[in-house]
């Protein structure tokens, strides 16, 4: 290469390497008026993604001499986009991680810090259908407590678990579907959606087990709602706009719903999770939370789209 004349000085320190692939790129910076030597552009033949580009041998000097910045940006964009699209193996939103931490901590505190009275938490703050049955209360001369005492279990039962295995399984499912819903709805709507699905599960279980004195605990109903919403969101995730939710009557949603109902009905008939004592898992609550997730995901998604200013595009 012949020396660059004094009319076109540049900074040699601006040589760099793009994307670690050994392709050296020169970005001229301080140029004076005039033209570069005719043979300078011929030396800038570079290969990007298997394409060899010969830059023009002569071009007017200005803000972007030879059009290098523009051309190199266009050529390297696929490489940069490919690299930026790679996601870490595990990158859950903070609200999901903290929710899991809260579930585990509450169970650990109940088990280790309140060894003698820990089981009473399940009665006082778990969902006990008999607490709402007037005939049961009268027959056993039980005082159900204040209105607040009877309302709190609809929420607190979600944050109690019967064992570390129970809270671990729920945490894994929450980690699987929580990020999908959080990224679509945002943190505030995600928390509201989680609670509403849990409330719906409690209501269904209460209606189908009226008068039962077995406490129900666990976040399974709320997480079932997240799973239902996740089924409607995947695999429609796309970088091009905000894809629409999968319709409720689509074959995919119907198939997953049928499988989920079948699994839970079998669990109920075989006594899996519905035996005597503390009901760690309640299959009716699962179905109630799941149904709420299917039905509420549409209105929540519409509200989230309006809040973010992004309209859904056809799936």
Image (spheres, helix red, strand yellow):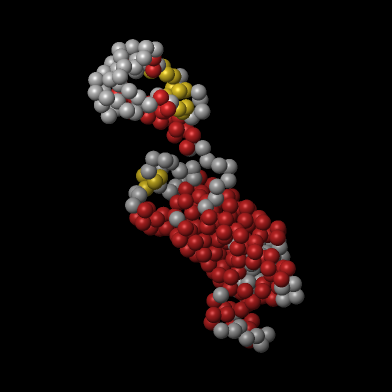
Q: Residue furthest right?
A: 116
Who's the residue at 48% across and 37% down the image?
A: 85
Q: Residue 233 in the image: x percent, y percent?
A: 47, 48
Q: Residue 106 in the image: x percent, y percent?
A: 64, 66
**Residue 301 seen in render:** yes
Who's the residue at 32% across and 28% down the image?
A: 30
**Quarter where residue 103 is shown:** bottom right
Who's the residue at 55% across and 70% down the image?
A: 155
- Horizontal placement of 172 versus 197: left or right? right
From what the image shows, is residue 7 above or below residue 82? above
**Residue 209 seen in render:** no
Quadrant of the drawing holding the N terminus: top left
- Horizontal placement of 197 versus 311: left or right? right
From what the image shows, is residue 18 above or below residue 150? above
Work out whether residue 251 or residue 124 is closer to the camera in this orientation and state it.
124
**Quarter where residue 266 is shown:** bottom right
Q: Residue 295 in the image: x percent, y percent?
A: 46, 58
From what the image shows, is residue 229 above or below residue 236? below
From what the image shows, is residue 272 above or below residue 179? below
Q: Residue 299 in the image: x percent, y percent?
A: 40, 58
Quadrant of the drawing holding the C terminus: top left
- Picture mark count: 0
- Horizontal placement of 157 versus 113: left or right? left
Work out whether residue 57 or residue 273 is closer to the camera in this orientation and state it.
57
**Quarter where residue 272 is shown:** bottom right
- Horizontal placement of 227 versus 169: left or right? left
Q: Residue furthest front?
A: 6
Who's the residue at 42% across and 58% down the image?
A: 300
């Amino acid at each position: 290469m012949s020396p660059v004349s004094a009319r076109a000085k540049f900074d040699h320190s601006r040589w760099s390497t793009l994307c670690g692939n050994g392709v050296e790129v020169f970005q001229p910076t301080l140029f004076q008026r005039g033209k570069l030597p005719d043979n300078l552009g011929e030396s800038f033949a570079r290969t990007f993604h298997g394409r060899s580009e010969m830059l023009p041998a002569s071009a007017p000097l200005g803000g972007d001499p030879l059009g290098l910045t523009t051309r190199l940006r266009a050529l390297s964009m696929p490489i940069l986009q490919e690299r930026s699209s790679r996601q870490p193996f595990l990158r859950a939103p903070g609200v999901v991680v903290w929710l899991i931490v809260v579930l585990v901590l509450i169970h650990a505190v109940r088990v280790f810090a309140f060894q003698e009275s820990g089981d009473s938490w399940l009665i006082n703050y778990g969902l006990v259908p008999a607490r709402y049955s007037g005939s049961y209360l009268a027959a056993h001369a039980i005082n159900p407590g204040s209105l607040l005492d009877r309302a709190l279990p609809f929420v607190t039962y979600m944050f109690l678990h019967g064992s570390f295995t129970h809270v671990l399984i729920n945490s894994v499912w929450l980690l699987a579907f929580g990020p999908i819903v959080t990224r679509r709805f945002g943190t505030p709507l995600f928390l509201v959606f989680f609670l509403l699905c849990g409330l719906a599960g409690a209501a269904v279980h209460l209606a189908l087990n009226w008068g039962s004195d077995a406490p129900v605990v666990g976040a399974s109903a709320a997480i079932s709602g997240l799973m239902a919403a996740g089924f409607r969101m995947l695999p429609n995730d796309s970088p091009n706009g905000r894809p629409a939710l999968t319709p409720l009557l689509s074959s995919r949603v119907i198939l997953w719903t049928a499988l989920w109902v079948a699994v839970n009905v079998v669990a109920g008939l075989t006594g899996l999770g519905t035996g005597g004592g503390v009901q760690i898992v309640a299959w009716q609550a699962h179905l109630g939370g799941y149904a709420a997730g299917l039905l509420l995901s549409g209105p929540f998604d519409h509200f989230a789209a309006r809040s973010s200013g992004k309209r859904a595009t056809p799936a």
